[in-house]
Image (tube, helix red, strand yellow):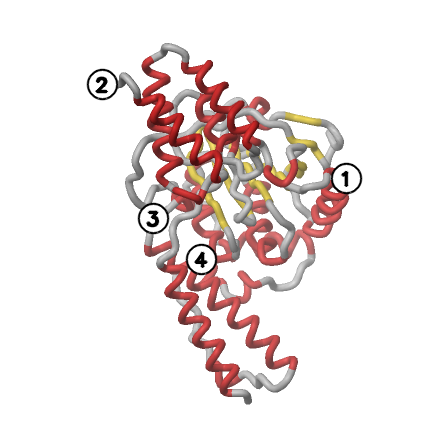
Amino acid sequence: MNSRTLLIATAFLSVFRLSILAADPVFSGPQPGEKVTSFQVIELTGDGAGQSRDPIAEYSGAPAVLVFVHGLERSLVPLLRVVDEYGALRKDRLSTDMIFLSPDRLEGERRVRAASGSLKLQSRVGLSPDGIEGPGNYGLNKDCLITIIAAKDDTVMANFALVQPGIADAPSVVEALAKLCGDDAPPAIEELNRLHSARTGAGRGPAEMRPEAARGNAPPPAVDWEAFDLETEAGLRSAVRALIGEVQTLRNEIARRRDGPTTGQPREEFPGAVPSDAVLQGLLRRFIQPTNDAAAVDALLQEAREHIGDDPGLRRQAIDGWTRILHFGDRYGTGYARQSGRAFLAELQEDVP
């Protein structure tokens, strides 16, 4: 066995633990308390395949979960299956939309249809016509592999912005969805995986092999790294699988240790505030898009000026909104947007008592 390789892997795991425990919260899409606004999605399955629809208008405030999938990767499959299975189980009280993002519409449609068939998804499956960034008024974070938005009465109740989603995220997500639709006895993750396997004939997945870890009720057994023969390909593959399991466990530990967007509660108070005015909310989300050029930024700020006009209430909301996004520095928007945003904020603050 190559002890040096084992030492490197162990050191990596330790560094990874420290780095992710200290990581800042990730934001993607409207946050709890904000309004969900209309957008279009191209239906890819069912009777309405090929047609455009507006989920927000269609659900009219009823409990719904919008799952924005930013990339098709194997790591998110266990979580997708759990959300899909729960949505199907509670379809009488919860609507579930899987919305995929792709830079190319034709290629995206082909890949998503294939993936939907392979995963045997029961939810409504669609593709955003707005490309890889998704609906401009939602401000989705391209660094996230998946963004899950749970809404009721057209208001966000929970938001899960996941850069590296895994089955460890499933308990928190199902708990939020159960609360959203008034489900007092949600099934355990193990049960949802069992239902999926029974329906599709699939074998035992990661959550079924580690049900206690999936439910978050008990830690999995400690990994015996000395048991892996790192001189062989089979041993290396087994070690990698074990390492991935450890990472998922650490992520579950983080979710328990700190409040954040995944629980629907902010970890700390930030300056400013999210505008209650829907138009200003949409302008802010469009303003922070990393694809904006200088002309687009200038046009958005002019649109904001015209909307605010002489209304002191809208001016106050705009001050709070731009104060908040500028607080996060280079995390949002382009350099030009941040520079122009600071000048716009100073302009708004003139003559304000």
Residue 54 or 59: which is nearer the viewer? 54
**Percent position of residue 353, x then y:** 22, 18
- Front disc: 1 or 2: 2
Q: Amino acid at mark 2?
A: Pro
- Front disc: 2 or 3: 2
In three-dimensional space, the C-alpha distance between marks 3 and 4, rounded to whole angstroms, equals: 18 Å
Residue 106 has which mark?
1
Q: In the visual, does 78 lie left or right of 149?
A: right
Residue matched to label 3:
259
Q: Mark 1: give few (<14), some (14-19) or many (20+) Cα within 10 Å.
A: few
The image quarter in which residue 198 lies: bottom right
Q: Residue at x 38, y 57 (%)?
A: 254
Residue matched to label 2:
353
Residue matched to label 4:
215
- Residue 120 vertical position relative to residue 240 in the rendered view, above or below: above
Q: Amino acid at mark 4?
A: Arg
Q: Mark 2: give few (<14), some (14-19) or many (20+) Cα within 10 Å.
A: few
N-terminal-most mark, 4 or 1: 1
**Percent position of residue 127, x then y:** 67, 37
N-terminal-most mark, 3 or 1: 1
The image quarter in which residue 305 lies: top left
Residue 254 or 3: which is nearer the viewer? 3
The image quarter in which residue 125 lies: top right
Q: Amino acid at mark 3?
A: Asp
Q: Secondary structure at mark 2?
A: loop
- Front disc: 3 or 4: 3
